[in-house]
Image (cartoon, rainbow, N blue to C red):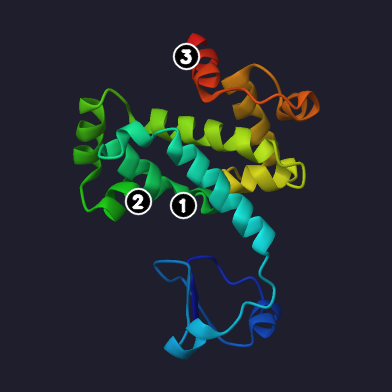
């Protein structure tokens, strides 16, 4: 197994915890496992959380099923796994899709949207799904959506809906994504 990270060294305690040396200053954060490790069970796996996340992602993508062959759909698919790591940037998405940032912007513009619009609408849609699951804390939802702080998520949610996420939780009512986009566009 090999561990690489772009982050600065935290401490020897971190390496002791992992039980192996860490290559700090690498170009990417990654853990490389041997091929034999692929069949080992993940002892701490949370099948419930995995099922919830897959369900939320599939629901968000299903709402956009009419755009399956669009560049927007490809961008949405590329954004999803990058969100929790805070890496959903146009440059990274363009790289994952094998085009330049400028080409991606032009293709999205041809469909009448910008990367920022797609990104924000994805976050808003996913936020609604995540908030309906009371087992997920606001802080956890913020992380899943790529926010570094829960307060940043709260601010964004207020911008999208006009209300804080705690109100959404209390009401139990689920707003449709078009209502969120309408409220967001009105500002």
Residue linked to disc 3: 185
Above or below for 122 versus 38? above
49 lies left or right of 36? right
Tell me which numbered mark, 1 or 2, is placed earlier along the sequence: 1
Tell me which numbered mark, 3 or 2, is placed earlier along the sequence: 2
Badge 2 element: helix
How far is mark 3 from mark 2, CA to CA? 26 Å
Q: Nearer the viewer, mark 3 or mark 2?
A: 3
Above or below for 53 versus 171? below
180 lies left or right of 114? right
Badge 3 element: helix
Residue 169: image location, x then y, percent? 76, 30
Q: Quadrant of residue 134?
A: top right
Residue linked to disc 1: 82
26 lies left or right of 145? left
Circles 1 and 2: CB atoms closer than 8 Å = yes
How far is mark 1 from mark 2, CA to CA? 9 Å
Tag of residue 92: 2
């Amino acid at each position: 197994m090999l561990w690489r990270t772009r982050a600065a060294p935290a401490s020897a305690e971190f390496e002791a915890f992992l039980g192996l040396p860490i290559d700090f200053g690498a170009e990417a954060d990654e853990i490389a496992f041997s091929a034999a490790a692929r069949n080992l069970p993940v002892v701490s796996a949370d099948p419930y959380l995995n099922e919830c996340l897959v369900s939320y992602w599939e629901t968000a993508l299903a709402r956009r099923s009419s755009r399956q062959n669009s560049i927007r759909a490809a961008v949405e698919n590329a954004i999803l796994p990058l969100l929790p790591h805070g890496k959903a940037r146009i440059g990274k998405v363009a790289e994952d899709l094998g085009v330049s940032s400028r080409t991606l912007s032009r293709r999205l513009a041809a469909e009448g949207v910008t990367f920022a619009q797609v990104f924000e609408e994805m976050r808003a849609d996913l936020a609604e799904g995540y908030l309906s699951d009371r087992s997920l804390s606001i802080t956890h939802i913020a992380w899943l959506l790529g926010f570094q702080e829960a307060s940043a998520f709260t601010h964004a949610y207020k911008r999208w809906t006009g209300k804080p996420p705690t109100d959404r939780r209390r009401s139990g009512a689920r707003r449709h994504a078009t209502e969120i986009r309408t409220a967001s566009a009105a500002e």
